[in-house]
Image (cartoon, rainbow, N blue to C red):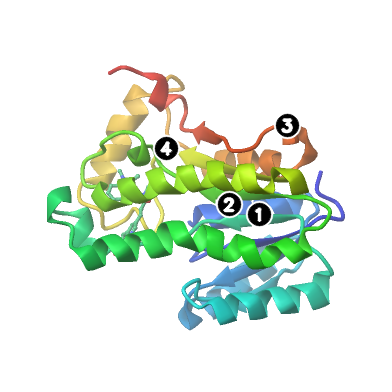
């Protein structure tokens, strides 16, 4: 479905990352991919994973999304290797651990700004310098969470960040529509990744969630990967500015 298409995925940490399930789905569909990782210590594992699990070997780049020079360098290299870009996956978020434990009102100025910079501004920061590579149109996909729309215990400043991220999706969609670049968010149900582990009561939360969804189950990585594939493909060419829930129906329920 993506033969001849080229894309970049920001935010793979390990084999449980939603970004990794998306990478696998896009690669299986025939896309040529680049993946970025945040930390040198992810590099070896990531290259091994790519060798073992991806039908088409990806390019890999170290990229700290707080460093505009580095982002530009990554796109320069992509232009040289791919000659263009059809889609971008943004799967990046961070808040200080103490801000995901206490009460929202206790969030410090620095904790608030950190969450907003890494989890929200990073989307604009990676899309803007990619535009010269997307002259034939394209698709941008980011990852949100229900905690951006409703109060979810402990999600706190990340909820405020996801609300701003979903709003960024709408403003970017309005800006880039004339270039036939679509911008959408996925909002998956809870999933056991590195960023969910270590959160107090997460395992209990998964059990609670499973019993409440219309589909009576938790989310699988493939659910998210395949919906991202849909958003990157022409099957979704009429959809932009949208947040699509991949949550087994959880968010429709009243209790
Ligand atoms: C995160 C915190 C609180 C409740 C949560 C989550 N629930 C879910 C998550 C219910 C599903 C996971 N999630 C959707 C996230 O966006 C996680 C973001 C995150 C996680 C961490 C953990 C480690 C750390 N900083 C983080 N920053 C963002 O130090």
Residue visible at 64% across and 47% down in the picture = 175
Closest to the camera, between mark 1 and mark 3, is 3
Please name the residue that numbered disc 3 is placed on.
Answer: 238
Q: Sequence order check: which comes first, mark 3 or mark 4?
A: 4
Q: Is the CB of mark 4 within 8 Å of ligand 1? A: yes
Point out the residue furthest to the right here.
4
- Crowding near the residue tagged with mark 4, few <14, some 14–19, many ≥20 C-alpha atoms within 10 Å: many
Report helix, strand or loop for mark 2. helix
Label 4 residue SS? loop
Q: Residues within 10 Å of mark 1 (few under 14, many from 20)?
A: many
Which badge, 3 or 2, is on the more N-terminal residue? 2
Image point (37%, 59%), residue name: 116
User: Residue 226 occupies which quadrant of the picture?
Assistant: top right
Q: How far apart are labels 2 and 1 at the CA level?
A: 5 Å
Q: Describe residue 216's horizontal placement relative to residue 175 as left or right.
A: left
Mark 3 vs mark 4: give the one in front. Answer: 3
Q: Earlier in the sequence, mark 1 or mark 3?
A: 1
Quadrant in which the C terminus is drawn = top left
Cα gap from disc 1 to disc 3, whole angstroms: 24 Å
Mark 3 is surrounded, within 10 Å at the Cα level, by few (under 14), some (14 to 19) or many (20 or more) other residues, namely few
Q: Which residue is the site of mark 4?
A: 189
Q: Does residue 91 appear left or right of residue 191 in this picture? A: right
Q: Which percent across, then down, holds residue 39?
A: 47, 78
Q: Is residue 71 above or below residue 222?
A: below
């Amino acid at each position: 479905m993506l033969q001849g298409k080229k894309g970049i995925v920001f935010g793979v940490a390990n084999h449980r990352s939603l970004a990794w399930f998306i990478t696998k789905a896009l690669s299986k569909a025939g896309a040529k991919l680049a993946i970025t990782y945040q930390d040198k210590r992810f590099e070896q594992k990531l290259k091994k994973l790519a060798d073992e699990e991806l039908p088409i070997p990806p390019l890999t780049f170290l990229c700290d999304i707080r460093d505009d020079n580095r982002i530009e360098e990554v796109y320069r290299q992509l232009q040289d290797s791919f000659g263009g870009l059809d889609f971008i996956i943004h799967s990046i978020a961070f808040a200080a651990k103490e801000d995901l434990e206490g009460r929202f009102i206790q969030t410090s100025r620095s904790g608030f700004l950190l969450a907003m910079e890494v989890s929200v501004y990073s989307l604009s920061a990676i899309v803007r310098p990619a535009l010269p590579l997307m002259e034939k149109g394209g698709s941008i996909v980011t990852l949100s969470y229900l905690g951006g729309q409703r109060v979810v215990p402990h999600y706190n400043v990340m909820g405020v960040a996801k609300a701003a991220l979903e709003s960024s999706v709408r403003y970017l969609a309005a800006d880039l529509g004339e270039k036939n670049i679509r911008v959408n968010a996925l909002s998956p149900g809870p999933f056991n990744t590195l960023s969910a582990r270590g959160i107090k009561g997460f395992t209990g939360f998964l059990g609670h969630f499973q019993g409440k969804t219309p589909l009576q189950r938790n989310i699988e990585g493939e659910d998210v990967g395949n919906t991202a594939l849909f958003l990157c493909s022409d099957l979704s060419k009429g959809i932009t500015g949208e947040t699509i829930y991949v949550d087994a129906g959880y968010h429709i329920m009243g209790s």
